[in-house]
Structures are given as structure tokens and as C-alpha cells.
Amino acid sequence: MAETSKVVTMKPKRKKARLKDRPTPETPEAKALGAAPSPRLEALDALIEAKVEAHLSEIEHRLEQSLQRMETKLERALAPDQSMRAGDRGLSLTSLLSVLEAMNPLSEAQPLVGELAHLLTRQLEKLGFIRIVGQTVADLMDHVSMDVDEFGYDQAFEDKLRPLLEFLFYTWWRVEMNGLENVPDRGRALLVSNHSGTLPFDGAMIKFGIRELHPQHRITRVLMHDMFNSLPILGPILSKTGCVRACHENGQKLLEREHVTLVFPEGAKGTGKYFKNRYKLERFGRGGFVRLAARTSSPIIPVAVVGAEEIYPIMDNATLIAKLLNLPYFPITPTFPWLGVLGLIPLPSKWTIDIGEPIRFDHLSEKDLDDDFLIDHLGNEVRLVIQNMIDNRLKKRKSIWFG
Amino acid sequence: MTSSIVKRRNAQRWREHAPSGVTERKTSRRRIALTGVRSFLGRRLLHLLRKDRRYGKIILLDVARPEERSRKCVFYAVDLTQPGIDQTITDILAAEGVDAVAHLAFPSTPRRDERVSHELTVIGTLNILKACARAPIHKLVVRSTTLVYGADYRNPSLLDENYPLNGARADGFIRDQVEVERMVNKLASNHPDKTVTALRFCPILSHHHTDVITRFLNRSTIVTPFGYDPLIQFIHPDDALMALKKALDEDYHGAFNIVGRGVLYLSTVLWLTNKRAVPLLSSLAYPLADALWYLNAWEAPGRHLDFLRYSCVADGEKAERVMGFSPRYSTKEALLAYLKNEI
């Protein structure tokens, strides 16, 4: 039409050149029939390999260059020149700085900043946690997702997060997992858990624990609150680790594909709970998860997490800031936001994750599923089961920090 | 093995559509009217139809004569946006005894002057639909895009055909497409005797085609909202064409997502295509993109950055189940073919 003609005439030169470059016009069908998809994948792999190699050789080259530069600088700095003798103490500040500068690979661009950063990181390296975080962040920054499933889950990415999760699971929170045998070895299952802890660390720990300790090393897919999906940086990270937005469509598709799916029916109400209300479960939505489980005939497996409530004790909620930042809540804890980023370090409570026996709702008819009151009631029943598990665990627990 | 199956299937189809008797066979050949023949898909579809013996006359409705000529083709100079043109089109369709109409005349990228693209998209479709409602045709196939779902953080990971078309919130270009979908849907419900198919294509990846996303990929530097990494979906042009042909050959009612299998993260796409991404805080990126758009230095209005921020991934399950359409190339393979300048 008129529009298309304009597009063509807008860049006539390029168009012509392209048409000339084109090989003899094969029929698209014949082309598609002849091409087998597998060599293409191999070619892609080769392409990626070539790219990685080029990247590596470039890094090598740069490193070599900076090493050379450092050597020459060291030589110059350590040579007994005039600047050294000029000072009364034999070693002047400038020469000391230049030695330091020579030892610092970052010095080329910004001498002082690079030096300070280097010194600072060397100090902080002594703290294991910082090192793990730094290493993980550096790994993740370099990561390019190649194999992702249709929901965006990237196993290679999750593997890179492992050191951090390992540290949190085994060292920081010393998570104890009970009842792993209730997670089926094969096939779909809907894990339903209480939610707490301001940031969704409980999801990460349940997921990591099942992957680590379950005999089949099953990969749990987590249904997350919309908010996390909308957040910069955190959103893509969660998505790459297999979290998807919590909605009926996603839940159904995950379960139909036989995934272990974890849902937090409390939602943001759970994570944004005040410390004084800890371990008192919020409303479980309106029981939508019961409908989901029944429709897909998957067992509901109750999960009770104890310990996550104490990692960020929420004293108050700054509703105005939350509203401005478009968040469901903005927590005020004893450390956050007062200590800034340091306030984000969670407290090292002792965690226990109890996994209960499966509950089945397969017997519900389509008519039952339409009954909102019944579904709400059943959702509440599940809530009580989990509340019971939590209460039992709390009775046994002697200390928040040591379990 | 597979080729023999394909042959047999074709033979069956042939028997269906071609009863015995030479004179009858000639009249039973399908007659099809095409709009937007000079578009990327239109040009290729015409090429396929010309060689397909099941199709008789091909009626081309366009403002200018396409390059490809054949005895099979009859060209009518028609400007779809002209008021009252629907009567002319109705007459043509009736006089030529057209069975099926493929409506492909849509701008593939937004225009700075929204009115122009609005005229072609909405008014052009309105005229075609009016003609189709009156003329004795039995099939209409309309090209649409998955952009109509819009990119939003509240989207499910895989959008199916029943999901509300929220793309209208974004900008005029997509709003027009959503309006087209609404009109097509209305025609389908008012005329249950006609088969109405809307094919929602995800971005078609080709150097000869200009989608919003593919135009982004033609740049060397690209502004992206900071901290986001949406999932991207592409389809190989051959697959897109195959789906279009399938919708014309056989009868499928309703809307279908036509997408490549699998997804890629935007970061991966940018890495593979060697683009420099300039991440900017979202609150800065949108106005900047808008400003660049009006200065002719950017490919789309600011709101299109939504597609570089949140995922808009459609589920091709229905097309596979109902139409039996399974793409030969995955998103990754399509991108590879694109990088090798094959498409």
C-alpha cells in the first residue's frame, strides 16, 4: 500500500545493494525443508566458542600489557632516583605512591581511586562473606544465558549463584531440612509454604535445599510476587533462577510440565509482616492454589519455614516511601535503612524447613471448584496445617540463633 | 520416510480440492485476493501461491503494481484508505469469485505521523472487513503481531490467545493493531459462516524485513532500561510463511500465536549480535527514546522500550495443537540464520 511503498523508497540504495547480494532466490519452502536444525545449533556453539576465545585472548593481551607496564614502573620507582633522595626520610611519599600505583592493575585509568579500591577490597577480602558475594557478583556480571527454557530458567546461571546460596544455606542460616521424602521423585507437585523475611530468601533456601538434598536433586520452580518481576536487577536474576510471576496461567503450565512448583499464598502480606506478628500466618489468598492443584491433579505439599522471620525484624513500614518507590512495603528494621547497605545483611538465625505429607484435592469436582466459599475454606485448612507445623517447631526451638 | 508422508498428505489434499473432470478442476481452483503484496510476507506468499496449482487466479489489491508478474495474477490499483473504497473491493471480490482474502497491508513499524499509520491499519482493515462481510468469500486471514499483548511485568510467562490485549496501553501503533483485532473478532462473531483467522506473529527476523525489534538490532548502539533483561522471541521468515500458507490452505477459525520455539534473553541477543547496550535508568530512558524518536534518531516511540524491559512471550501451543504448525527453527536458530545473513 502507500505505506509500504514509502518504506521501499526511503532507502533505495541500500535496498538495491541488498537485493544484489542476495543469492539466487530459492523458494523459502525448499530452503526450510533442506535445512536440518541440529547442525545449526552446533554452528551456534562454534560461534559462541569463537567469541569466548576472542574475548579470552583479548583479556590475556590486556593483562600482558598491564603486567609489562607494571614491571617498567616498578623498575623506575625502585631505582634510586632524585625524588627518593630528595626526601629527608629516604623514601618520599610520592615514590611510595608510585610503587603502590605500579602494583595496582587498575591504576592506569584512575590512579587514586583504583588504589583505594584495591586496598579496600584487600581488607574486605578477609571477610569470607564479602568475598563470596563479590565473586558471585563478578561471575554473574559476566554471564550470558545460552540455554534457557521457555520460562527463562537458566541452569548455568543458577550454578553460578551456588557459592552464595551454599554459604547462606550451610554457614549463615545452618538450614535443617526435614521431610524431604514427601517431595515426589518424579512428576508434578505444588509446594505451599509460609512466607517471611522481607526479601524472598525463604524461597531461595527451599529451592536450594531440595536441589541439594533431595535424592533426585529436583529443581523447584517458584511463583513470585509481581513486584519482584518489576524490580530492576533483582527481576532478571530471579527469572533466570526459575522464578515466574505468580498467576494461574504460569502455575498451571509449570505443573502440566511436571515441575515441582513452590507457591507462597500469603504473598507480600507474608514477607512484609511486622516482627510482633511473626509466625502468625496471614490469609492464604482466597485458596486459588487449591483450585490450581485440583485442576492439575497435583498433590499439595505443605512447607513450614521457621527462622526466616528473624532475619530482618520489621518494626515499621514507611508507607509513603513504599508508595513513591511503587513497592508493597518499605521495611524499617533495627538496621535498615539506618546502616544503608550494611543494613541489608540478614541476621544469622537458625532455620528449620519442615516438609509435610502431601494433601490431595483430586476428588473435587468441577462444580466444587466453582464454589468460591468451599475453595476459600479448603485454602484455610491448608493454612492451618502449616500453622500447626510451625507451632510444633517453635515449641521445640530453644534459641533463635542456635535452634 | 517423512517426505513420503508429506507427499501422501498432499495427494489427499489434492483429491479434496480437485474433483475429477478438467473443466471442473479449473473452476474449483481457489481464487485468492491479497493485500499488502509488496510487504515482506506478501511478496513471499505471492511467490508460493503462484507455484501452487491448487490456487487459480490471484487478485492483487494494492496501490502500485508489484514486481512479480505472472499470468495467474490480476492487479487492481486500490488504495485501502480511500473513503468508499469498500464498495469497489466488494465488487472486485464478487466479480472475480474470490474464495479467500489474505490481508497483509500493515505498516510494520511505527510512524512519526501516527495518523498515517492509523489510516492504513485501522481504516484500511475496516474497508477490507466491510467488503469481506458483503462479498461471498468464505475465508479471511489477517496478519497481526504478538505486540498486541503488550510487555508488562504482570504478563504470564507464556501468553495464550485468550489473554487480554493490553498492548493498547503502550502507544498508537499497537493500539491500532489491537483495534484491528477487535474488528476482526467482531466480523468473525457476526459471520459464523466465514472462516476468520488472525495470525499473531512474533518479531520476524530478517535483514529484508523491518519489525521494531529487528530495527533495534540493525543499530550498533541500543538504549536499554537499566537492570532489566526480558525474554525475546523470534520467528524464522520461512516458518512465518509456512504458517500463513497453512492458514490459507486449510480452515482454522480464531486467533493463533505464530512464534518460534524457545526464548532468549535480551542480553544474549545483544551479545550474539555484538551490540553495544547503553543501560539508562528507566525514568531517563523513556523520555530520551521519545526525544530521539522525534529527532529521527531512534526506531520507535519511548513506550516501545517496554519490550526491552519486560517480557512479551506468546505461547505457540494452540497453533501446534489446532493448526498442526510446528516451527522448523527455534528462536536461537532463527537468530543464528540472521547472523549468518541467511535471512
Image (cartoon, rainbow, N blue to C red):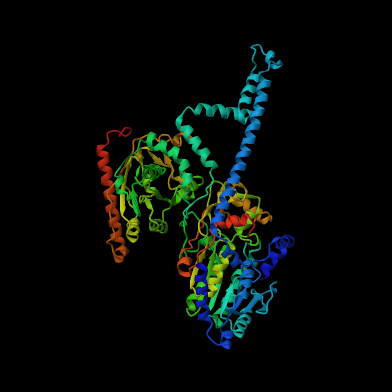
Q: Give percent across and percent down for residue A96.
A: 63, 19
Q: How many marks?
A: 0
Residue B82 visible in the picture: no
Q: Give percent across and percent down for residue A17.
A: 73, 60
The residue at 51%/26% (across/down) is: A123
Q: Give percent across and percent down for residue B100.
A: 56, 78
The residue at 48%/80% (across/down) is: B193
Q: State the residue in front, A251 or A373.
A: A251
Q: Which residue is most to the right?
A: A13
Q: State the residue in front, B35 or B258.
A: B258
The residue at 35%/51% (across/down) is: A265
Residue B287 visible in the picture: yes
Q: State the residue in front, B11 or A341.
A: B11
Q: Which residue is most to the front?
A: B1
Q: Quadrant of residue B207?
A: bottom right
Looking at the image, residue A103 sits to the left or right of residue A351; the answer is: right
Task: Please determine whether, in this image, residue B212 is positioned above or below residue B93.
Answer: above
Q: Quadrant of residue A288?
A: bottom left
The residue at 58%/47% (across/down) is: A48
Quadrant assignment for the C terminus of chain B: bottom right
Q: Give percent across and percent down for residue A129.
A: 45, 32
Task: Please determine whether, in this image, residue A91 is positioned above or below residue B268.
Answer: above
Q: Quadrant of residue B293?
A: bottom right
